[in-house]
Amino acid sequence: MDYEDSTVESRKVYEVCEKHGKPVIVMEPVKGGSLVNLPADADKIFRDLNGGSNASYAIRFAASFPNMAMVLSGMSNMEQMQDNLTAMKDFVPLSDKEMTAVHKVCDIFRNLNLIPCTSCRYCIEENECPRGIRIPDLFSALNAHEAFHNWNTGYYYENILTGNGHGKASECIKCGKCEKVCPQHLNIRELLTQVAGVFEH
């Protein structure tokens, strides 16, 4: 998802490292878990390959580059750890067929126009939001709304706001502190306006 993304420019970064013979370390190959539960049409593409899990394709994509020294994947439980180990034991780079499938899945995501937030939480932990807006959680709610159109995404949004005085998206004062620390270089202030437009009507 990040390889050809104009805000992250992973391909350009990798090519500079390759040009200078520098080994590369990738963090969050599964984008904070957002590449696990795919939209149905994207999930079907990987299931039709009769191969590994969605996470395994993301990890193997990152690990398939020649200058890759390490792929650091976050895991929440033993099952995820075992899945990651299986993907990397006796490692085989993605085949042409698998790479084509990865590109098709990326195209589906791009057409969804999702917010590429990885929930690193730097925006609210490195520089505390003066309005207490839980930015990554609100973006997650909007992405779920756009990707899955579930009836309960509005309820999820309201749930995020409950307790501890968490601010609504519309309460952003546009200070820009969050954008200065965002590793994805997201236009957070503008995106919060979109979130408010969907959930606060």
Image (cartoon, helix red, strand yellow):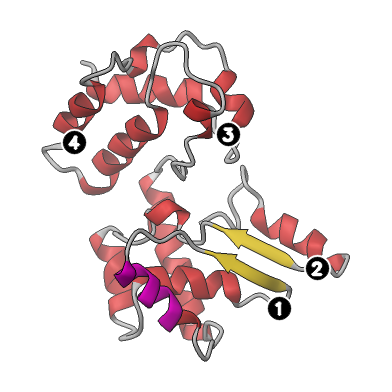
Q: CA distance from mark 1 to mark 3?
A: 28 Å
| Circle 1: element type | loop
Give SS at disc 4. Answer: helix
- Asked if residue 81 is among those painted magenta in the image, a careful observer would answer yes
**First in sequence: mark 3 or mark 4?**
4
Tag 2 and tag 1, C-beta contact below 8 Å:
yes
Residue under the point 41% across and 22% down: 192
- Left or right: residue 20 compared with residue 83: right
The correct choice, above or below, for 51 with respect to 165 in the image is below
Q: Residue at label 4?
A: 153
Gap between marks 3 and 4, in whole Å? 24 Å
Q: Is residue 88 above or below residue 127?
A: below
- Name, please, the residue furthest toward the left: 151
- Work out which residue is located at the far bottom of the displayed protein and give it: 90
Numbered disc 2: secondary structure: helix
Distance in Å between CA atoms under marks 3 and 2:
25 Å
Residue 21 in which image quadrant: bottom right
Q: Amino acid at mark 4?
A: Thr
Please state, as top left, top right, bottom left or bottom right, where the C terminus lies in the image. top left
Residue linked to disc 3? 182
Q: Secondary structure at mark 3?
A: loop
Label 2 neighbour load within 10 Å: few <14, some 14-19, many 20+: some
For disc 1, the neighbor class at 10 Å (few under 14, some 14 to 19, many from 20) is few
Report the residue marked by disc 2: 18
**Rendered location of residue 52, percent (x, y):** 35, 80
N-terminal of the pair, mark 4 or mark 2, is 2
**Which residue is the site of mark 1?**
66
